[in-house]
Image (cartoon, rainbow, N blue to C red):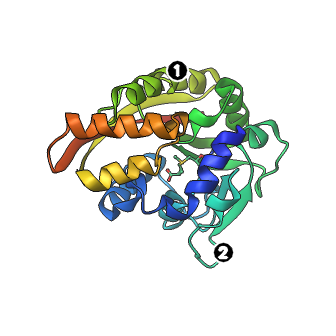
Amino acid sequence: MSGSTRDHYDRLAASYDENWAAHSEAFNGWMSGRILERVGLRADDRVVDLGCGTGIFSRALATRAREVACVDPSPKMLAQLPQTGGALVPIQAAAEDVASGKVRLPYDHVDVFLIKEALHHVRNREAVVAGLARLLAPGGRMLVVTLPTMISYPLFRRALEVFAERQPDPADIAGAVQAAGLAVEVTYETYRRQFARDRYVAMVRNRHMSLLSEFDDAELENGITEIEREHPEEVLEFDDRFAFVLGQHP
Ligand SMILES: C[S@@+](CC[C@H](N)C(=O)[O-])C[C@H]1O[C@@H](n2cnc3c(N)ncnc32)[C@H](O)[C@@H]1O
């Protein structure tokens, strides 16, 4: 990953779980359910949460599997992994290094890869997806959870434009998964978000999304003024829509 992405997550690590993607137990429970119903875990499955961050969803996986390898290039994000008596095994590495074999996993074959909101940070996604697919055991699953290119967050216009330019299209991810020899299925789910406006603005000011690291302080403050102008309401409500790209090894 780029140095700036690493800096972003190292800086954000301590407050990550308080931020909006993570702060809500209701959201985490909802998202965990959507993930678990797709990957269909068995206790002896070898599971890897790739780009695990602080391990919010690794923990959900560990409710069904004995052990989860938690892979992330940011040591500060990994340092926030929940203490679960050894069920979560931290591995500091980027997806590229796992896919190329430069970094070995604790298992020769993997039954489940979860890659939630991390694949957009990976360059050469086709090669990485293909490398990971080669590590799957027969019947293994790879679940990529990702935002679509168009999001309806109450951000400022330029931030939404930059997001749309940079975010990989889930259809292209599905194409890469299929090209890697996996049967692919794409589904969407929507979660209704609700935030007090002041809280949301504080999260934007804290650059809770890596996208916001693209803007300097002055640009960000102008963006916040735009948000406050466009959204006078005290509570911001919007749909958070996720794509679930599920690949299955034949
Ligand atoms: C938005 S966070 C998602 C964390 C976690 N999956 C979740 O949903 O809570 C993105 C994570 O991807 C990690 N990341 C960045 N570049 C990566 C790469 N090349 N390979 C794997 N993970 C990467 C970051 O360090 C960060 O922890």
Quadrant of the rendered image containing residue 228: top left
Q: Mark 1 is on which residue type?
A: Asp
> Is the residue marked by circle 1 packed among few (<14), some (14-19), or many (20+) residues within 10 Å?
few
Whether residue 249 is visible, yes or no, is no
Q: Mark 2 is on which residue type?
A: Gly
Callout 2: CB less than 8 Å from ligand 1: no
Q: Residue at x 77, y 53 (%)?
A: 105
Q: Is residue 218 left or right of residue 202?
A: right
Residue placed under numbered mark 2 in the picture: 86
Q: Is residue 49 left or right of residue 39?
A: right
SS for callout 1: helix
**Extreme-left residue of the structure:** 233
- Numbered tag placed on residue 88 in the rendering: none
Residue placed under numbered mark 1 in the picture: 172
Q: Nearer the viewer, residue 47 or 98?
A: 98
Q: Residue at x 40, y 40 (%)?
A: 221
Residue 171 spot, x, y in % from top left: 47, 21
Quadrant of the rendered image containing residue 213: top right
Count of labels in the image: 2
Whether residue 35 is visible, yes or no, is yes
Quadrant of the rendered image containing residue 157: top left
SS for callout 2: loop
Residue 137 lies, with reference to residue 89, above or below; the image says above
Which of the image's four quarters has the C terminus? top right
Q: Residue at x 47, y 23 (%)?
A: 169
